[in-house]
Amino acid sequence: MADVFLIGLIFVLAGFVKGVAGFGLPTVSVALVALLRPIPEAIALMLEPAFVNNLWQGLAGGQSREVLPRIGVFLACAVVGTIAAAWHLASVDGRLLSGLLGLSLLASATLALAAPKLPAPDQPLERLLAALMGLVSGVLAGFTGSFLLPAAPWLQAIRLPREQFVQG
């Protein structure tokens, strides 16, 4: 019963981070729940709240007409990658998942602190890279529960305005 209470508090904290930053619910919740439960279980617990939250944010943001044409391929490939990785989640060693999550969090924090100004790709290259970035983001999200890499740097690199970035 104590685990249920603590996990509930973790999701409240992760929701607060998401509300303030516009992203981070999966990253915060998986990282902290993994301290209490095995990592595949932490990822599984995060799926529904993150899906519902992201669906709400995607539909309520008011920027769909501007965002979807620009990142539709990215999102479609991210869905494919996420499903493919999640399909294999139970068969992957928890230590590997834990290490991958740790590397993902370390890379996210490093990028956030360094705040590099990534070059914007020209339009033909953006279209080509969108599929690759989406697929890689999806696979990492499926295995770690964190959709930050390379999704957030990619969306920054293509110079989406803040409202579109958050909705995307």
Image (spheres, rainbow, N blue to C red):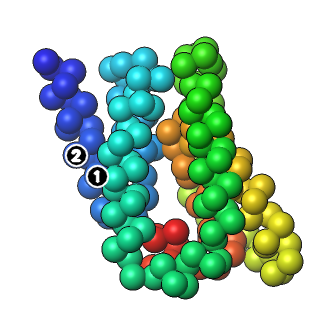
- Left or right position of 35 against 154: left
Residue 37 numbered tag: none
Q: CA distance from mark 2 to mark 1?
A: 5 Å
Residue type, label 2: Val
Whole-percent x and y of residue 131? 75, 59
Find disc 2 in the rendering and name its residue: 12
Q: Which is more toward the observer, 5 or 63?
A: 63
Residue 40, placed above or below residue 140:
above
Whole-percent x and y of residue 106? 59, 41
Residue 58, placed above or below residue 31:
below
Query: What residue is at 21 percent from the left and 21 percent from the top?
Result: 3
Query: What residue is at 60 percent from the left and 16 percent from the top?
Result: 91
Residue 90, placed above or below residue 155:
above
Q: Which is more toward the observer, 63 or 108?
A: 63
Residue type, label 1: Gly
Q: Is residue 32 visible?
A: no
Occupied quadrant, residue 158: bottom right
Whole-percent x and y of residue 84? 65, 37
- Left or right position of 153 against 1: right
Secondary structure category for the residue under label 2: helix
Query: What residue is at 15 percent from the left and 20 percent from the top?
Result: 2
Residue 15 numbered tag: 1
Q: Do the numbered discs 2 and 1 sit on residues whose CB atoms are within 8 Å?
A: yes
Q: Residues within 10 Å of mark 1 (few under 14, many from 20)?
A: many
Whole-percent x and y of residue 133? 72, 56
Q: Which is more toward the observer, 13 or 163?
A: 163
Q: Is residue 64 visible?
A: yes
Secondary structure category for the residue under label 1: helix
